[in-house]
Amino acid sequence: MTELWIGLLLTAAGCYALKLAGLSLPARVLDHPMTVRAAALIPVALLGALVAVQVVGDGSVLTLDARLAALGVAALLLWWRMPFLVVVGAAAASAALLRLLA
Amino acid sequence: MTAASSDRAIITDSLGVGLATGAYGISFGALATAAGLSVWQACAMSLLMFTGASQFAFVGVIASGGSPFAGAVTSVLLGGRNLFYGLSLARLLDLRGWRRPLAAHVVIDESTAMAVTRATPHQARVAFYWTGGGIFVLWNLFTFIGALAGTAIGDPRDFGLDAAVGGAFLALLWPRLDSALTRLVALLGAAVALGLVPLSPAGVPIIVGGGIALLAGLLLQSRFGGRDD
């Protein structure tokens, strides 16, 4: 549990340092076109990996189960421009329902 | 429109965004405790990190069995975008002295989006502080409620909470999939990460998959993207 607290506090310190640095650093330091492009792509690359591991990862194996069906439901609702909470709630509900029926 | 009524309109909009965003703190709180965090750890995250995508990422890595340090790396990398928000906000907010470290804490997606679209620096400041402050209060309140709810239920899988995390990540990713390049980078990140799941400790596939997809995206962009500049 202590390890979790350390990781948590390190993350909080890191996230805060980034916010403060953005407000404090002179603009030219971050103005390089490559830096700007990388900043736009980092969330896309990481979130892509996070979705995949969260939905089909199961320890060190890959498993196709109710989570994948729930992701399909989430994608459909996002396509219909539903708000965040509706999407997340529907993903949970559809996985719960599938498991109940299985 | 007079200055006062224009301020009131901005404050109303900001609080509306604050309510909508703060409310999904409830899903964060529930998912955090389902992943094995205590109520206090969930609340400490919202209080101290206060940047939604990074918080979800940390919890997601922990939920998939990764170490807190793999969670920290993923989470801080995701928080990198706040660095660039600060850059555009610094010109508008004109922060001095003790205000800067305080304002820094509420530099997030929504407060930035609400501020940078304003016509004057005064309006930008009103929008930034009301959106950031509103979300901060509500996000923490709803995290606490969600965390309590998350511990009150039995097996989180029975409620599909594990599946909700994937839905949350997809919802955060969705608005960024606005070009062929971003769609390719996201797919590549997903594919590399999945390929690494059987081969590496939990948490590593996300960092390495994301890193390789980022490099490929940058290479593709400098090779083919120059025509748009």
Image (tube, coloured by chain):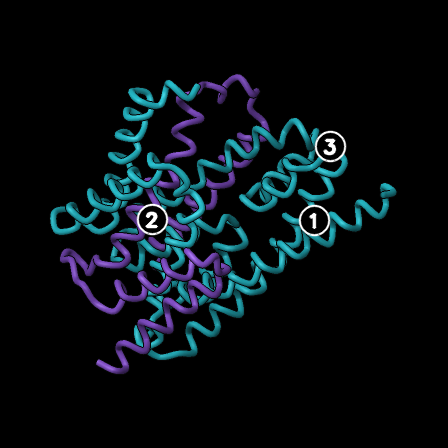
Chain colours: A purple, B cyan
- The residue lying toward the viewer, choosing from A80 and B29, is A80
- Whichever of callouts 2 and 3 sits on the residue coming sooner in the sequence is 2
- Whichever of callouts 3 and 1 sits on the residue coming sooner in the sequence is 3
Q: Nearer the viewer, mark 2 or mark 3?
A: 3
Write down the quadrant of residue B207 in the picture.
top left
Position of residue B138 measured from the top left corner of the image (x, y, whole percent): 61, 60
Q: What secondary structure is marked by label 3?
A: helix
Q: What secondary structure is marked by label 1?
A: helix
Question: What mark, if any, has residue B71 been given in the picture?
Answer: 2
Q: Nearer the viewer, mark 3 or mark 1?
A: 3
Label 2 and label 1: CA atoms lie apart by 30 Å
Question: What mark, if any, has residue B121 been given in the picture?
Answer: 3
Residue drawn at the location 55% of the way across and 34% of the way down: B85
Which chain is home to disc 3? B
- Circle 2: residue type: Gly
Residue drawn at the location 80% of the way across and 45% of the way down: B6
